[in-house]
């Protein structure tokens, strides 16, 4: 029995055409027409002026922090409920993360907690160099509220839209709200290049600087001159070809993932103790992963019961991300919860579950997963 993954690559069939073009032109090496084409098409799709495609989403976050001049003595505020890749680049620069809780309406950064953290930071004369806001599982954070409070303190926002490419907030594409947005094309994301990422911005100068930093920071001289540290972060022309083929079907993939979500929703919506990650009014989630919480007292089963039962059938399900403020790596880091005595991300981690959500999952597979879960529920 083949393993069913949370999210697996789903090719369009056109990727090979773009790769073949690169071979025909013998343009295998970094940069070239696919890189230029992918950057242009990705910017157009998101209605943003500029994009630099790079080797990973993590590299894109790192470049954003470099562009905002994050230094070792600085702090960076960051959503706690996320994948570690959001925060690792803060450590690359030797800076200190401060973690911000989620709120219940989106599972993303709490505008209340971020304001609290900024008030304290201002009082202590230690405002952060940047705020990194994550859009979990495709659902956009409360961008208006978060951007408003960050603007009040003049702190730039980096939008980690690694999971929310194709999602919308008030009709505007996810990833285009902060000074910088980042996307990921890792193998498990809604579209993939096998590995890759992008940094987007409306500021042309910043994106040009990002491209410079991502190609070893070469000064304009024939003799390879360097005045600052650079990185080898550019996306290759072959990989960008995969991206162009994938971008053509992004909207289709969003609809497919939303339909997977709807099937789960219809099956479980009336079950006591099961709550789905909400979709905030005036937003459209790409539903990258269907995420829900299981209240064991009300549902009569635990999140882990479901994970184990599915695993026995070779089906992958996982808890929601373990919050960063609970990770050994970030022991001792400051954390601001949504309410004084209530941490939303702790609760989501305790009972939260992600179900297989691939756009290429068959109806039969999905029906089987739904039936396995329904069979676990107590009959009364
Ligand atoms: C996947 C992911 C990243 C990192 O992207 P890579 O391309 O794997 O480096 C960053 N943030 C979040 C929230 C992610 O899910």
Image (cartoon, rainbow, N blue to C red):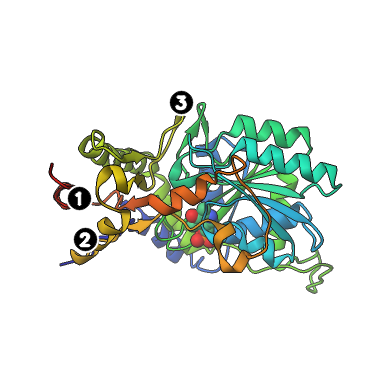
The percent position of residue 145, horizontal first and vertical second, equals 63, 30
Question: Quarter-wise, where is residue 8 in the image?
Answer: bottom left
Horizontal side of residue 26 vs 217, given as left or right? left
Give the vertical position of 56 relative to 79 (above or below). Answer: below
Instruction: Say which residue label 2 marks.
Output: 309
| N-terminal-most mark, 1 or 2 | 2
Horizontal side of residue 284 vs 14, given as left or right? right
* Mark 1 crowdedness (10 Å alpha carbons): few <14, some 14-19, many ≥20: some
Residue at the spot 59% in from the left edge and 34% down from the top edge: 143
Viewer-proximal residue among 302 and 95 = 302
Horizontal side of residue 359 vs 218, given as left or right? left
Viewer-proximal residue among 37 and 209 = 209
Question: What secondary structure is found at the residue carrying circle 3?
Answer: loop
Q: Does the beta carbon at disc 2 come under 8 Å from ligand 1?
A: no
Q: Quadrant of the C terminus?
A: top left
The percent position of residue 350, horizontal first and vertical second, equals 42, 53
Residue at the spot 67% in from the left edge and 41% down from the top edge: 114
Instruction: Say which residue label 3 marks.
Output: 281
Question: Quarter-wise, where is residue 250 in the image?
Answer: top left
Q: Which mark is residue 373?
A: 1
Question: What secondary structure is found at the residue carrying circle 1?
Answer: helix
């Amino acid at each position: 029995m083949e393993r069913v993954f949370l999210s697996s690559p789903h090719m369009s069939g056109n990727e090979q055409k773009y790769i073949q073009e690169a071979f025909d032109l013998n343009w295998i090496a970094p940069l070239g027409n696919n890189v230029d084409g992918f950057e242009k098409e990705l910017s157009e799709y998101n209605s943003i002026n500029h994009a630099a495609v790079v080797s990973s989403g993590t590299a894109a976050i790192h470049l954003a922090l470099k562009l905002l001049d994050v230094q070792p003595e600085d702090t960076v505020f960051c959503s706690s409920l996320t994948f570690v890749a959001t925060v690792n680049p803060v450590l690359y620069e030797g800076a200190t993360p401060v973690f911000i809780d989620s709120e219940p309406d989106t599972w993303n950064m709490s505008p209340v907690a971020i304001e609290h953290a900024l008030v304290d930071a201002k009082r202590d004369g230690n405002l952060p160099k940047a705020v990194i806001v994550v859009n979990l599982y495709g659902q956009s954070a409360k961008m208006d509220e978060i951007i408003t409070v960050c603007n009040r303190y003049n702190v730039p926002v980096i939008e980690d839209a690694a999971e929310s490419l194709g999602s919308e907030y008030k009709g505007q594409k996810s990833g285009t709200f902060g000074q910088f947005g980042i996307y990921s094309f890792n193998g498990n994301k809604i579209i993939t290049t096998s590995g890759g990422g992008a940094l987007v911005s409306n500021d042309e100068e910043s994106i040009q600087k990002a491209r410079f930093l991502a190609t070893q920071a070469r000064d304009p001289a024939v003799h390879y001159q360097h005045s600052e540290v650079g990185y080898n972060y550019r996306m290759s022309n072959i990989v960008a070809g995969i991206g162009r083929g994938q971008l053509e079907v992004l909207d289709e993939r969003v609809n497919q993932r939303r339909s997977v979500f709807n099937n789960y929703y219809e099956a479980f919506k009336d079950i006591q103790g099961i709550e789905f990650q909400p979709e905030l009014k005036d937003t459209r989630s790409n539903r990258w992963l269907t995420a829900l919480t299981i209240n064991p007292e009300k549902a009569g089963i635990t999140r882990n019961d479901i994970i184990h039962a599915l695993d026995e059938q070779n089906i992958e399900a996982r808890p929601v991300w373990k919050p960063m403020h609970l990770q050994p790596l970030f022991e001792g880091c400051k954390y601001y919860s949504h309410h004084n005595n209530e941490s939303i991300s702790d609760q989501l981690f305790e009972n939260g579950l992600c179900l297989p959500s691939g756009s290429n999952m068959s109806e039969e597979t999905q029906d089987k997963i739904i039936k396995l879960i329904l069979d676990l529920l107590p009959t009364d």
